[in-house]
């Protein structure tokens, strides 16, 4: 059993209102040291597979079929 | 300059509809090997601070004041 995180972010140039608004709110609260905020979504999955290579391939397939919109999203697959 | 991720999840017992729906959709698409899906939000910040201990303290403060609802959320601070 593997624990895998799929981190979904936005491509450069795609607007990130959640990140921008969080940044603005932090500034208003006095956290002036924050230079930028990016917002990402994470799907943390438990997945059974014979080995990590197979698991990674299956997760890539899930990204293509459901989790990711390649027009706007970047993604990263991390095994914990 | 530090790059910090604040990972916000839901406490045990708090319903996670985004995770549950993703799990169901993956199953319908034939990904039967997925045992569970949890949905998390991540704020990835660039923050300037004299050292990591100070940065961590400031980020904890941001969590308390803005990012986290302690009634339903768990959080994790990760330095990249």
Image (spheres, coloured by chain):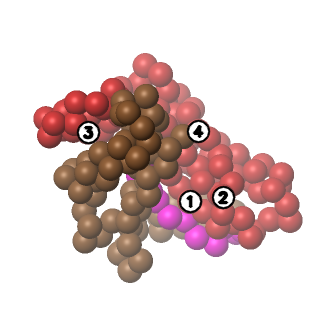
Chain colours: A red, B brown
- Foreground: A39 or A66? A39
Is disc 3 in contact with disc 2, using a CB cutoff of under 8 Å?
no
Residue at position x 19%, y 52% from top? B65
Number of other residues with Cα within 10 Å of mark 4, as a class: few under 14, some 14 to 19, many 20 or more: many
> Is A79 situated above or below A27?
below
Kindly indicate whether the residues beneath marks 4 and 1 are on one polypeptide chain: yes
Q: How far apart in space, not on screen, are marks 4 and 2 (Cα)?
A: 16 Å
Q: Secondary structure at mark 2?
A: loop
Chain bearing tag 1 is A
Residue at position x 41%, y 77% from top? B12
Chain bearing tag 4 is A
Q: Which residue position holds label 4?
A: A75
- Mark 4, mark 2: which one is toward the viewer? 2
The image's mark for residue A44 is: 1
- Foreground: B6 or A72? B6
Number of other residues with Cα within 10 Å of mark 1, as a class: few under 14, some 14 to 19, many 20 or more: many
Q: Which residue position holds label 3?
A: A22
């Amino acid at each position: 059993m593997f624990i895998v995180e799929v981190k979904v972010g936005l491509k450069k140039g795609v607007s990130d209102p959640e990140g921008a608004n969080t940044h603005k709110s932090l500034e208003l609260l006095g956290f002036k040291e924050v230079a930028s905020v990016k917002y990402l979504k994470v799907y943390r999955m438990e997945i059974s597979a014979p080995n990590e290579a197979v698991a990674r391939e299956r997760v890539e397939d899930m990204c293509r079929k459901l989790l990711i919109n390649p027009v706007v999203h970047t993604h990263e697959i991390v095994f914990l």
